[in-house]
Amino acid sequence: MELSSGSRDARPAVTLVAAVLPAGGSGERLGGATPKQFCALQGRPLVSYTVRAMERISWISNIIVVVSPENIETMKSIVEKYGHKRVTVVKGGKTRHRSIFNGLKVFAENEISNHLLWKPEVVIIHDAVRPFVEEDILSKVVMAAKEHGAAGAICPLVSTVIASAADGCLDHSLERARYRASEMPQAFLFDIIYEAYQLCTEYDLDYGTECLHLALKYCKTNARLVEGTADLWKVTYKRDLYAAESIIKDKLSQQVYVITGVEEAAAQIGVLLHESLKSQLKVEAISIPQSKSDSHLQNIFSGQCYNFVCVNDKKYAIQETQQLVDMLEKSNVTLLYPLVLILVHLDISENISFSIGMELLTRIKKLAREVKKKNILVYGLLIQHKGSLIESVLMATPSILSRELSWDWNIQ
């Protein structure tokens, strides 16, 4: 399938793209018994966040995670527990380059894998301990690799680099403006990087770290350097774990998915909520026909979002509410974080019944008590109105929803 550039999700014009994530480090600099890639952030292993960052990008066909032999079963259990897709776990080598080479061999050598995966045109190499990579930078390095053969993200140097003499005194310093820090992700035409690894020496495999250098040294491929962003940093020390956890929690608290039915009133409120909340939160909105909601909602719930606002006609309220809760219980989402589900029910009939409205809210309150034990926080909001909904929604709903979302995440 040919992918084209310039689309909404910045898909690169490349036939097939795969990713190799080296995750075989011992975590010595972290100073703990658990390798950093398996350390838990908000209850979820760090490597799982990085896999998910790749997994949510539809144009990445396969994700190869390379781990040390003693961690094979641990990684496989993570893949199973968190429902990761398109992932193959591969046994790594004793060094970084040997592990990456093993990951590449999955596409070319039968003895490494029970089944040969489709060889990609371009392969992304990205550290498993860099969880905040975004689609934009991945697309840029892939497109640059397609044109130049190799590409890598870079960032400005924060500190000046100096060289010390044999006596421990300053020898010289480098002009910081002329140099850049090599970061991840990097991308290569598969045939180029695979050939480079086949040709490189044992010394390179044992002591080298820079993949771009191998492509230049053995294939004469001069990499295109792509300016990266500040969120490409690598979790190396214990303080980095704390920083990463803080970033993850902040990102999750600032995202909300607005789900509506296709009824005119519900869809109208969905649009209004999107417009009103987007200045405060990252908002995605979708209208789903009642008959097709199962598959659509399953795709949404498998994503990395934990706040949902669901708007429906009151006559479908209990049916749709139960459907949503059942799907959430079957997913792995609530194993990681508390999930906020705000239900907005519309009653725009001419004969509004206060008693029926209270009965609905009482049933939702009972449901909320039951599912709170399962880490799902349910709130109900009933809107009863005979006239136009626009003024009521703009005045009341956004402020209520923002307050509830902020409050729930601030107390966690």
Image: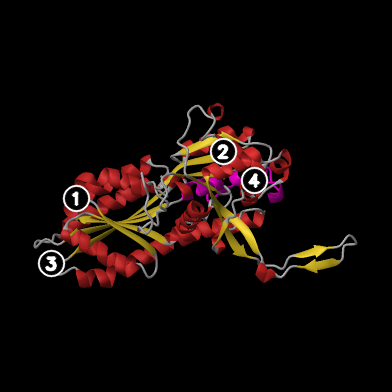
Q: Residues within 10 Å of mark 1 (few under 14, many from 20)?
A: few
Residue at 16% in and 66% down: 385
Under mark 4, the amino acid is Tyr
Under mark 1, the amino acid is Tyr
Mark pair 4, 3: CA separation: 74 Å
User: Which residue was labeled with disc 1?
Assistant: 316
Report the mark closest to the observer, 4 or 2. Answer: 4
Under mark 2, the amino acid is Gly
Question: For residue 103, which numbered disc appears in the image?
Answer: 2
Instruction: Indicate which disc, 4 or 1, sits on the residue closer to the N terminus.
Output: 4
Report the mark closest to the observer, 4 or 3. Answer: 4
The quadrant of the rendering that contains the N terminus is top left
Any magenta on residue 43? Answer: yes
**Which residue is at the front of the view, 58 or 410?**
58
User: What span is in magenta?
Assistant: 25-53
Describe residue 396's horizontal placement relative to residue 83 as left or right: left
Up the image or down, 16 lies above or below 73; here it is: below
User: Which residue was labeled with disc 3?
Assistant: 386
Up the image or down, 169 lies above or below 7; here it is: below
Instruction: Indicate which disc, 3 or 1, sits on the residue closer to the N terminus.
Output: 1
Residue 410 in view in this figure: yes
User: Which residue was labeled with disc 4?
Assistant: 218
Report the mark closest to the observer, 4 or 1. Answer: 4
Spot the residue most to the right.
167
* Residue 72: percent from left, percent from top: 58, 33
